[in-house]
Amino acid sequence: MSIAIYPGSFDPPTCGHMDIILRASNIFDKVYVACMINMRKTTMFTVGERVGMLERMVSGLGSVSVVSSESLLAEFAGELGADVIVKGLRAMSDFEMEFQMSLLNRKMNPNLDTLFLTTGESFQYLSSSVVKEIGSLGGEFREFVPGCVYEDIAVKLKEVSKNAK
Ligand code: PNS
């Protein structure tokens, strides 16, 4: 059985993430979408909120489960029996960091390879940060996030901008 892990901070999840989840689920027997800690980022949504949104997004996909962890990806993947990390790659700007993480993860767990899926062309410009920025400034971001999570994100962004005033 082929098992993959798709890790990220998903703060919040976007249509670009959904595209990678769908494509990974067509390649692997089992995909774990793992909500993890990125020490280079501070998050707006709690882990519970992010996991809840991801669970709604994958509810129709029988081979996909959502998990979360505060540990190292290389270790967590091993615990889940995953031998492939799936990452979405947008433009060259993503590459350097992803390349480094891929090498480090394989160094820490030699059984672990990273498979890069190029992001769908319509999502090249899309990121969680862009969604947060547009939404916080009152812009329309509906088309950038799956419909089932739009309200959660809109409510949170309103709450955060209100508290910042
Ligand atoms: O969506 P992101 O923020 O680009 O995802 C980055 C993430 C969460 C996959 C990465 O920071 C990660 O693997 N975090 C888990 C902790 C870890 O293993 N860090 C070392 C990476 S080499």
Image: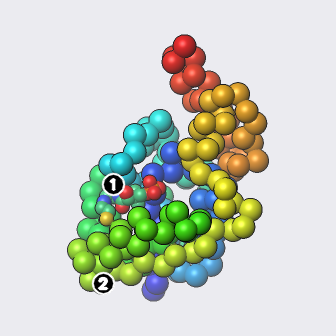
Amino acid type shown at disc 1: Ser
Q: Residue at x 53, y 80 (%)?
A: 28
Where is residue 128 shown, x and y percent of the image?
Answer: 57, 47
Q: Nearer the viewer, residue 112 or 95?
A: 95
CB under 8 Å between callouts 1 and 2?
A: no
Secondary structure category for the residue under label 1:
strand
Q: Is residue 12 above or below residue 20?
A: above
Q: Where 111 sits versus 41, above or below?
A: below
Q: Is residue 81 visible?
A: no
Residue at 48% over, 69% down = 95
Disc assigned to residue 69: 1
Residue located 38% across and 81% down the image = 113
Q: Pointer 2: what residue?
A: 111
Residue 156 pos. (x, y %): 57, 30
Q: Residues within 10 Å of mark 1 (few under 14, many from 20)?
A: few
Mark 1 or 2 closer to N-term?
1
Q: Residue 116 in the image: x percent, y percent?
A: 52, 76
Q: Which residue in the rendered view is the most extreme toward the top? A: 165
Query: If the image is split into quadrants, where does the C terminus sit?
Result: top right
Q: Nearer the viewer, residue 137 or 18?
A: 137
Taking the image as shown, residue 150 lies to the left or right of residue 97, namely: right
Q: Position of residue 143 (x, y in %)?
A: 76, 47
Q: Quadrant of residue 101?
A: bottom left
